[in-house]
């Protein structure tokens, strides 16, 4: 029935937007000359980067679970405890803490994500490259050379295989499989941003075996781990070659996986055309989940590229998005910041667009990862904090083991509170009662239990942390610890107990809900300046430019302070953002602008949000759309001009645009809440709102002409209609409406209910 309703709604008056306009495709006149400008391909587990090195075609090959998982040496000593760190902070004897727990991350090469290898093809006889195109709708890269040779390549969306097809090829075909250099001179050491030399890992160089139409590479890593790359090809006719590649990983304590050689052997029994058909089916479904069109071509194209990268990097049955996901640096070094899982911002921002973007299936891989590693998190919680419950390290390996680093953040007690929001969001956007009961609430409950145990009551009866921090204020110095609870930690703890209360209420667990509410009410209010700006701590205001808007968490993403709460809340939101703007972006990164766009959208500032997105796309991205952190234009958008590639800024950008078009929180849905005055004709299709509502809307020449809403699970929500145009209900089934005031309705829906509004002619 629901599928029928969706099909029916798709035919109603709002035509479905074309899945992927050609104008958004990545079109280049030549191959990139460095890896972080390459054409990216992927399926969540396998990734490829297509570029040129030493005047030859290079396809860098990667797999998400290639990890050197050796323990961080020296980290787990007797002093490894929150209580010991507190004592050192109180004694103001902090150098030894940095030596024990910060320094190992900087100076040891592992644990770390590691690269796979590369496929290299000599193209010198083919002449110069005439064109390079990544077609987003099909996720296929096509390259044409001067002599007419054409390469088409993709990473199959539904199988652990990469495919390539060479057409109109002349001469011999003699590809090479290149291994990373695990032996050689160490030129770089102790550089977590630029990356250590791979040779510091100490591996014996792996073996490459070449057959008639196949090449394989086997590499042993640390602790019995190994991986294998296999390449196979066959001649279809005199001028056509088809080939496949795969990577398999093998961990000694895990179930034996199928070898890459077997995978490619099986794949070659198929054809390029048949694999392409399956591949396209997945991507057609992905692009059909949601869409949008706005009159700003730069922002729209960047959004489509972000959607493409998300579809390439996120899968339910694959590891979640790490700093670089499946596109590990192919430069002879380890990836920036070891390519690990940073939970003090990076993983969280990477999944922001999945919810309103209606890509919850892909986002499920993030939650699955957290659930799989929960026993390890509980071990860490007991070891470091000395209590039960769930605390997640801020910086972890593939299996969730702590890695050290700046411990104010890498061992922060509130990391799991931020991660709880993703369990909360998944429930709110799906209204999946079983997920709430079996998964979300049990996880959030364990987090709340931990926070209750780790906090203390002061003499006035207010609950606080013994020591607190705010990423990444004062870096990793003693002054980065505060005896006052920061707004960052405070907002996260308030959110965790609020979420636990709401979840328990929804499950009719009145006693537990009452308990969590009592604990949540024991925290102080957020710290404000005399000008009603959010501060870092009660005694420290935001007084210098900083990349991480940690003190602003209560506005976005946590939504503890909402514009809809009235003038007092609006004053806090407006003044806090104004302070950010007035102090300026000197030390902002690209992700700062993406986050700022979300904040300004929550402040209903469409002009400001669009400006932040424009700066991000223009100044902080490579030619292939990768977020490079630093300002690449030297136009004053940041004092940082370096270029370590990380993904969180890309995906926060996508979330920012979606936030401008549709907002849903606090039991309300707002359509076009934050668009610039110059955006007169725009539309979006099947964005998802909290309450499991799918929403589509269109504006033409400044007038909202159509809105359609489908309720997957039923329920009640307050709907804020745009002020432009008089809308009337022209089709409805299973939805009742009650007018609250002009422009606001309460809609009460049954499962599968839908409603269509149109402009009065």
Image (cartoon, rainbow, N blue to C red):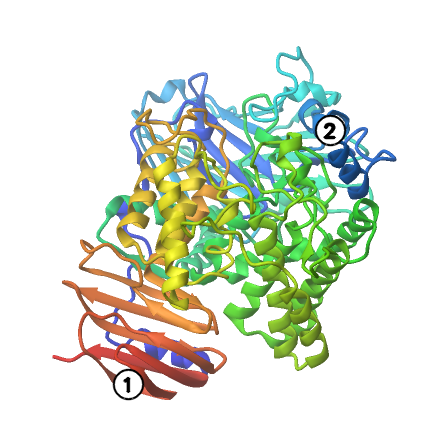
Q: Quick one: label 1, few (<14), some, or many (20+) residues within 10 Å? A: few
Q: Do the residues under discs 2 and 1 have CB atoms within 8 angstroms?
A: no
Residue 207 drawn above or below residue 513: above
> Is residue 435 shown to the viewer in this render?
no
Q: Nearer the viewer, residue 237 or 363?
A: 363
Q: Nearer the viewer, residue 650 or 585?
A: 585
Q: Quadrant of residue 688?
A: bottom left
Residue 30 position, x and y percent, is 33, 27
Q: Give the camera-side residue of 344 and 429.
A: 344
Residue drawn at (31%, 63%), measured in percent from left and top?
673
The correct choice, above or below, for 132 with respect to 210 in the image is below
Image depth: mark 2 or mark 1 in front? 2
Q: Earlier in the sequence, mark 2 or mark 1?
A: 2
Q: Residue lying furthest left in this view?
A: 761
Image quadrant assignment for residue 332: top right
The reply to whether residue 731 is in sight is yes
Write down the residue under mark 2.
Answer: 94
Above or below residue 751? Residue 542 is: above
Q: CA distance from mark 2 to mark 1?
A: 66 Å
Horizontally, residue 336 falls left or right of residue 134, namely right
Give the SS element for disc 2: loop
* Residue where numbered disc 1 is placed: 731
């Amino acid at each position: 029935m629901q599928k029928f309703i969706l099909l029916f709604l798709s035919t109603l008056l709002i035509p479905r937007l074309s899945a992927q306009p050609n104008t958004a495709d990545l079109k280049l006149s030549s191959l990139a000359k460095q890896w972080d400008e390459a054409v990216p391909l992927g399926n969540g587990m396998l990734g490829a980067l297509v570029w040129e090195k030493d005047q030859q075609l290079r396809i860098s090959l990667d797999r998400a679970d290639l990890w050197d998982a050796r323990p961080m040496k020296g980290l787990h000593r007797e002093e490894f405890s929150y209580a010991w760190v507190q004592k050192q902070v109180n004694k103001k004897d902090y150098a030894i803490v940095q030596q024990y727990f910060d320094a190992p991350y900087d100076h040891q090469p592992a644990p770390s994500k590691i690269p796979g290898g590369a496929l290299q093809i000599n193209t010198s006889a083919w002449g110069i490259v005439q064109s390079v195109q990544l077609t987003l709708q099909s996720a296929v890269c096509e390259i044409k050379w001067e002599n007419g040779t054409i390469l088409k390549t993709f990473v199959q969306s539904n199988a652990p295989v990469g495919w390539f097809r060479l057409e109109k090829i002349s001469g011999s075909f003699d590809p090479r499989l290149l291994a990373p250099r695990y032996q050689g001179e160490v030129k770089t050491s102790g550089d977590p941003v630029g990356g250590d030399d791979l040779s510091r890992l100490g591996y014996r160089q792996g073996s490459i075996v070449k057959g008639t139409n196949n090449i394989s590479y086997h590499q042993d890593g640390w602790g019995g781990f190994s991986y294998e790359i296999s390449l196979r090809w066959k001649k279809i006719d005199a001028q056509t070659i088809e080939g496949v590649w795969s990577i398999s990983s093998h961990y000694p304590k895990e179930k034996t996986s199928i070898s890459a050689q077997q995978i490619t052997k099986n794949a070659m029994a198929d054809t390029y055309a048949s694999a392409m058909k399956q591949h396209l089916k997945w991507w057609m479904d992905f692009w059909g989940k949601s869409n949008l069109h706005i009159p700003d071509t730069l922002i729209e194209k960047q959004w489509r590229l972000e959607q493409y990268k998300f579809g390439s990097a996120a899968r339910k049955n694959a590891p979640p998005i790490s700093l670089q996901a499946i596109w590990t640096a192919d430069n002879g070094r380890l990836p920036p910041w070891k390519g690990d899982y940073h939970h003090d911002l990076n993983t969280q921002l990477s999944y922001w667009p999945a919810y309103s973007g209606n890509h919850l299936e892909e986002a499920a891989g993030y939650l699955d990862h957290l659930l799989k590693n929960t026993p390890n998190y509980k071990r860490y919680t007991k070891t470091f904090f000395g209590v039960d419950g769930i605390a997640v390290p801020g910086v972890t390996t593939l299996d969730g083991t702590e890695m050290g680093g700046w411990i104010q953040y890498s061992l922060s007690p509130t990391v799991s509170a931020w991660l709880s929001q993703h369990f909360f969001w998944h429930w709110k956007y799906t209204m999946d009662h079983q997920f709430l009961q079996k998964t979300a609430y049990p996880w959030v409950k364990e987090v709340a239990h931990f926070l209750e145990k780790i906090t203390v009551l002061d003499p006035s009866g207010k609950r606080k942390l013994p020591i607190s921090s705010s990423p990444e204020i004062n870096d990793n110095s003693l002054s980065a610890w505060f005896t006052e609870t920061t707004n960052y930690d405070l907002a996260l703890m308030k959110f965790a107990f609020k979420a636990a209360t709401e979840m328990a209420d929804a499950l009719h667990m009145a006693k537990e809900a009452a308990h969590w509410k009592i604990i949540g009410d024991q925290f102080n209010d957020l710290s404000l300046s005399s000008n009603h700006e959010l501060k870092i701590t009660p005694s420290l205001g935001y007084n210098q430019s900083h990349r991480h808007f940690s003190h602003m968490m209560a506005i976005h993403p946590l939504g503890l302070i909402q514009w809809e709460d009235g003038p007092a809340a609006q004053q806090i939101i407006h003044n806090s953002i104004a302070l950010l703007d007035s102090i300026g972006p000197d030390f902002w990164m690209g992700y700062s602008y993406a986050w700022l766009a979300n904040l300004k959208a929550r402040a209903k500032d469409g002009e400001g949000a669009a400006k932040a997105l424009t700066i991000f796309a223009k100044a902080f991205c490579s030619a292939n759309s990768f977020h490079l952190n630093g300002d690449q234009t030297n136009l004053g958008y940041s004092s940082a001009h370096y270029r370590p590639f990380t993904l969180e800024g890309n995906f926060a950008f996508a979330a920012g645009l979606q936030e401008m078009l549709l907002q849903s929180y606090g039991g309300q849905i707002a359509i076009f809440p934050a668009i610039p005055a110059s955006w007169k004709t725009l539309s979006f299709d099947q964005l998802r709102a909290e309450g499991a509502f799918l929403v589509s809307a269109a504006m033409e020449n400044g007038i909202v002409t159509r809105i359609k809403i489908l309720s997957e699970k039923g329920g009640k929500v307050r709907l804020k209609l745009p002020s432009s145009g008089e809308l009337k209900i022209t089709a409805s089934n299973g939805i009742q409406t009650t007018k609250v005031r002009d422009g606001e309705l309460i809609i009460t829906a049954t499962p599968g209910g839908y409603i269509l509004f149109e402009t009065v002619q």
